[in-house]
Image: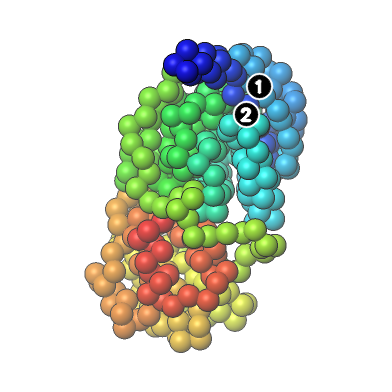
Amino acid sequence: MLLLFILFSVLCVGQKKNVVILATGGTIAGAAGSGVQSGYTSGQVTIDAMINAVPDITKLAEIKGEQISNVGSQDMSFEIMLKLAKRIAELTKGANVDGVVITHGTDTMEETAYFLNLVCKTDKPIVLVGSMRPSTAVSADGPLNLYDAVAVAADPNAKNRGVLLVMNDWIHSAQSLTKVSTTAVQTFMSPIRGLIGTTAYGVNEYYRLPHSKYGSQSEFSVDNVTALPRVDIIYADVDMPADLIDCSVEKGAKGIVIAGVGNGNMTKSALEACTRAVKKGVTVVRSTRVATGNVGRNVEVNDDQAGTIASYDLNPQKSRILLSVALLKQRKPAEIQKLFSDY
Ligand SMILES: NC(=O)C[C@H](N)C(=O)O
């Protein structure tokens, strides 16, 4: 019996994992006329060409590629994100898929990563990856990033850590990462909660689990969903006018996220417009345009009186994703506030 167990374990360890790469576009699939020019077009190269450019990934896992879309992530849409979520659900149900990699543009990668973190029920590794330099650039960063992403997706130790993003040797949680540079290759940071781990040429190290709910603990489902409710982000600044908020309500927004100044603050007139919006049944979340720190409840704004929700550590773009998914179901304000602390 013991011998059989040892033989089985040896066979399993020796077996290559199966990783599916879902390609959506981005600079990692971008191309320029020369290796040293700043102008380029995202989403030009197919998944097959990207896989062929990194032959070493086939030593890490059995690889299959699928083209979901081929867009710059500035054109990422809820339609494509829903398509991705459904395909991941199908793939990860099968015993023949151990992990999924998603190639994606970096501009909105945090939104897609966080959305998938909310709605994907699997505990298998789901890893997003992109690049800052197009595939034709001198010192393109895409090939090594793709190699690292596959190394993490094929790693049993990456299981049950929620949706991850791998770029430039760092492994981030979808919940904590944000894009911080328009051009630098080290563009993703996890400023509040820190990294999940690191990866270097197939050697992965993990520091922590995500602190929020994800995967099988998540209560969200987009199984029968074809569209998400409209949620607008409105940016606060000096002398912010209130009419943008009224306009958003008139245009049919079901939710509004304020990218507030400081601790989710805004002008008195903007706050009055938020209160008007809440009275009309629109959910208003106060987030912040500041890169780090929490937006707390009832700090300078009396949320109990205004009927507003505090975003805690979610930035405006992630607050918009959580609110859009939360509003798929009728929920009381207190329930929505709790989601912002749980996710
Ligand atoms: N580095 C990038 O991927 C930027 C590009 N605009 C995109 O998001 O598709």
Where, by quadrant of the figure, is residue 177 drawn?
A: top left
Please provide percent x and percent y for residue 132.
55, 31
Q: Is residue 188 left or right of residue 24?
A: left
Q: Secondary structure at mark 2?
A: strand
Amino acid at pointer 1: Glu
**Residue at 45%, 50% in the rendered image:** 214
In this rendered view, identify the residue nearer to me: 322 or 188.
Answer: 322
Above or below, 258 against 209 in this view is below
Residue 261 is left or right of residue 140, and the answer is: left
Q: Which residue is mark 1?
A: 62
The amino acid type, in three-letter code, at marker 2 is: Val
User: Which residue bears the numbered disc 2?
Assistant: 19
- At a point 55% along the width and 54% down the height, the residue shown is 119
Report x, y in % for residue 150.
56, 26
Query: Which residue lies most toward the front here?
Result: 1
Tell whether label 1 touches label 2 (CB within 8 Å): yes
Left or right of 88 on screen, residue 212? left
Q: Residue at x 38, y 25 (%)?
A: 205
Say which label, 2 or 1, has the lower sequence index. Answer: 2
Residue 234 visible somewhere in the drawing: no
User: Could you classify mark 1 by the number of other residues whose Cα lies within 10 Å: few (under 14), some (14-19), or many (20 or more)?
Assistant: some
Q: Secondary structure at mark 1?
A: strand
Q: Does any atom of ligand 1 lie closer than 8 Å to the CB of label 2?
A: no
Is 49 in front, or is 72? 49
Q: On the image, which quarter does residue 154 sit in?
A: top right
Q: Quadrant of the C terminus?
A: bottom left
